[in-house]
Amino acid sequence: MPVTKRRPAPNLPLNARRSRRSGPGRAASHRADRSQPRRAAPGRDAGGGELLRHPPTPHVVPPPPARHPAAGQGSLEYVGLLSVVVAVLAVAAPVAGVSGVGPEVARAVRTGVCIVAGDVCRPSDAAAAGLAPCTLSDRRRGGGAAVTVMSIRLGGSHDWTVARRSDGSVLVTREDGDEAGVSGGLGLEAGPLRLGVDGTLGLTVAAGTAWELPDAATAARFLSEVGRGAAFDSRRWPPAWRSGDAGLAASGWAGLGVDLGDDDGVSGSLAGAEVTAEGALGARIGRGVTTLYLRAERQGPQLEDALGHAVGPQGGGPVVAEYTRDRGGPRELAFRATAPGTRANEVVETVARLDLREPANRAVAARLLRRRAPWPPSVLEDLRAVIRHTVAAGTVERSVYAVSDRSGDVELAGRLGLELGAELQRTKVDRRLVSATAWTAGSRARAREDCLG
């Protein structure tokens, strides 16, 4: 049984990563407003799945005072005035021979309505709330190969990801990984019943490099130079960060079958169960900032009968905890998660961030940060307390992407005295942002119109 291959999770979409294995439970997966302006947190990119859609209220809020009968009248008058302006220009602009006025006015109206609604409407609003630019779309291309001799598997892969951001910048990431694993199985018979179990255990190591480029034209020149195989000039194209991680992947399967007693020795499968777990520790370093991260993922246990009906959790995507510090000390805690969306071929990524430069936030996180591995079970309560505070007092960003995954693989197997196998993999994943929402300091959900307008 092949070993699942993982790659660095850092700054780019955690999900939209396709499992290299097939079987049940392997769904496709590939980064009130504050009274004072917030400081932007480091390393902001798309995050992972959904933590809490509506952050809890951190304290009891007294009922609001009675509203004046004219409250809100100014906002309604503003929207009404914009509507009148649109109507007048829609009629007058063609008569005057002025082109391009309509779309500009429509954009201004959308921004005006957005401001009235209290959403994040412009890049300046996002910066004031401590929000980074959104990843509008990204595409992953690459592949890999693996060879299996008896029960030992060795493999490697490389991928390039190009992510386009709402501020016009482009993040290009290269990921290279190697894996080694071993598998084994055992079969038992009891009368007509047959029981089989097998499992795999593998080690993965991966390295990544990322370049932040100011615009699409610069990114095109960079990729063209890389594609030509020209000697790479690191002084001309300095990386934004480098990362590396190492992890373990394990999976197990158990099945129950029956010998039907035919002369041909035909047998059938009654049921099977499968579970997979992965974990990795890594670091990302660049521009004076170091981020340590822990990634964990589990799929199953899932039961499947002879008719192909599956019961049990299928799993979503990885959950990642990140701790960032710079020369000044602790800087940020972040929690990322990935989950399937409500529609087919959709993934939801959520990231919750806590700025540790704020004394109150650092005090809440201090107990968790003092813990050292191996962690006792009580560390889970400290972790829950920090996550609750992050959702209530930090920033939560939720992004929904439409995913087109046309990845595939080809497997060959044979026996030449020894069991031999080979696998070729191709990665081709495209994602497009369809909605983005943010909660800042426990506010209501605020649409990221600066990303989708």
Image (cartoon, rainbow, N blue to C red):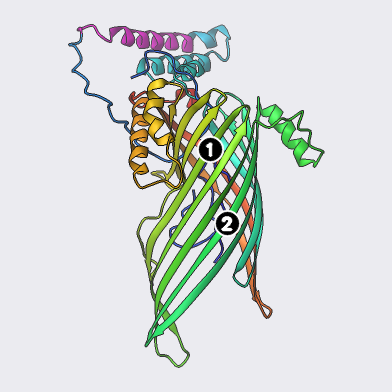
User: Would you place residue 372 above or below residue 252 in this image?
Assistant: above
Q: Along the line of sight, which residue is nearer the eye, 274 or 115? A: 274
- The span from disc 2 to disc 1 (Cα, nearest Å) is 19 Å
Q: Quadrant of residue 355?
A: top left
Is 73 covered by the magenta stretch? yes
Q: How many marks?
A: 2
Toward the bottom, the furthest residue is: 263
Q: Position of residue 38 (x, y in %)?
A: 44, 18
Q: Position of residue 424 (x, y in %)?
A: 65, 60
Q: Quadrant of residue 227?
A: top right
Q: Position of residue 307 (x, y in %)?
A: 38, 70
Q: Position of residue 18 (x, y in %)?
A: 54, 51
* Contact check, label 2 and label 1, Cβ < 8 Å: no
Can residue 259 be seen here? no
Name the residue rendered at 80%, 41% in the picture: 228
User: Would you place residue 179 above or below residue 127 in this image?
Assistant: below
Q: Which residues are magenta?
A: 68-91
Image quarter (top left, top right, bottom left or bottom right) of the N terminus: bottom right
User: Would you place residue 369 above or below residue 92 in this image?
Assistant: below
Q: Along the line of sight, which residue is nearer the eye, 125 or 390? A: 390
- In the structure shown, which secondary structural element does the residue marked by tag 1 occupy? strand
Report the residue marked by disc 2.
203
Q: Along the line of sight, which residue is nearer the eye, 123 or 132? A: 132
Look at label 2 and name its amino acid.
Answer: Leu
Look at label 1 and name its amino acid.
Answer: Leu
**Principal SS element in the magenta part?**
helix
Compared across the picture, whether 378 is left or right of 13 comes to left
Name the residue rendered at 57%, 32% in the picture: 290
How busy is the neighbourhood of tag 2: few (under 14 within 10 Å), some, or many (20 plus)?
many
In the rendered structure, find residue 292 and report the number of the disc placed on it: 1
Is 232 covered by the magenta stretch? no
